[in-house]
Amino acid sequence: MDLRDSADDQSFRDEVRSFFEDSLRGDFAVVRGRGGPGDEHALFDERLAWEKHLAAHGWTCVGWPPEHGGRGLSLRRHVIYYEEYARARGPGRLGHIGEGLLGPTIIAFGTPEQQRRFLPPIVAGDELWCQGYSEPNAGSDLANIATRAELDGDEWTVHGQKVWTSLAHWADWCFVLARTSRDPDPRRKHRGISYLLVPMRQDGIEIRPIVQVTGDSEFNEVFFDGARTAAGNVVGGVDEGWKVAMGTLAFERGASTLGQQLNFRNELDAITEAARRNGTASDPVMRQRLTRAHIGLEIMRLNALRTLSGTESGTLGRDALVGKLYWATFHRGLGELAMDVLGADATVCGATRESIAGEATGLTGVAPGSGYDPDPFQRLFLFSRADTIYAGSNEIQRNIIGERALGLPKEPR
């Protein structure tokens, strides 16, 4: 595995870097570094304009095939794109669920009609998506969903509840797992599930924000009470949604993980700078912890490159299963490190003091005002507590590694 850029790849990297550096000035300077984890509510209108700016210059959906509006980038160049986006501190992408999850799913499993209808608005930044998977009794056990859909003439009617639905309050569409028939054998719960595309702006859908410990409400409860969608908005066939849903989850583990890790690098650089500024870096134990965090990030990056190497299709092997467990645990620890660097200042709300983690360190996001307003380091700490829970808790990830990678007996039920 050669991790060095070829001359052509370096030229591409220079092109991407130049575009982001030039674009994130002027009107878009305000969105630089904003909208990430714990800061998702920031500057919605400005970030939506950023999505359309990317689209106008051909920098959305870069890994999609050209016939579907993308650039058809190789996996290596897709990684370069994400790395440079993170290095430039591009804002949190409002279109990432459509671009990274729904779009590839439609390309892989959708009909030509579905591809023509749903892919172009994602490329253009005109339609935003959310994901309707988890339910109160179906989080880690996704096959236990109770939301149901029934065919009524030429439309499906949907009844049920989803939870932890990120960006639902902004989304135009939701891809929803719903039970369209029931297998009498409880051991085959994954059968009879369909993957539906449901418009969000209609009667029959209620969205209730869930206030997080950060004070924001990036995710929501969504209640479907007779919501309707066209009969043809089923991806992969009626009752065949489980394999489609698993395909969507596989796309979540692809090249974008490298960009995520560079965002972690931005955070670690800011924490290190804060340690220098307040003198914490003079403590040998703290220097050792900062060094370990640096080494941990390098291990994460090299392992991601290793698991992605040689698979231009993006199909990941068993060794990739450790990825989520590793980065989630690392990032939670990074939040704890940030609090220890701040020391006593970590207990004081960011809005009431001059934040060590402000503009000078590269992490912005403090909006001065009254009330509870954590600074970027505090947001990092609070948000990262959830890293080891969402997208599969650490316990579930260990079961997956044991059963699917190591071939160990399944957990007793």
Image (cartoon, rainbow, N blue to C red):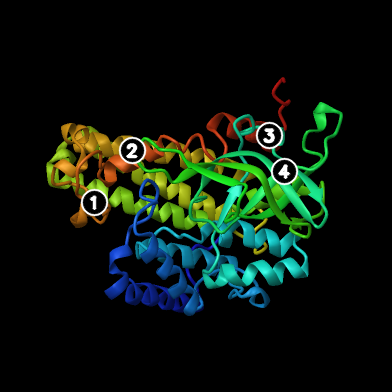
Q: Which residue lies furthest to the front in this view?
A: 203
In-front residue for pair 137/401: 137
Does the image show residue 7? Answer: no
Choose the circle earlier in sequence order: 3 or 1.
1
Mark nearest the camera among 3 and 1 is 1
For mark 1, give the secondary structure.
loop
Query: According to the image, label 1 marks what residue?
Result: 367
Choose the circle earlier in sequence order: 2 or 4.
4
Q: Could you tell me residue 229's position as x and y percent?
A: 71, 55
Q: Report the Cα–Cα distance between label 3 and label 1.
A: 47 Å
Q: Which mark is residue 406?
A: 3
Q: How crowded is mark 2: few (under 14 residues within 10 Å), some or many (20 or more)?
A: many
Q: Is residue 128 left or right of residue 347?
A: right
Mark nearest the camera among 2 and 1 is 1
For mark 4, give the secondary structure.
strand
Choose the circle earlier in sequence order: 1 or 4.
4
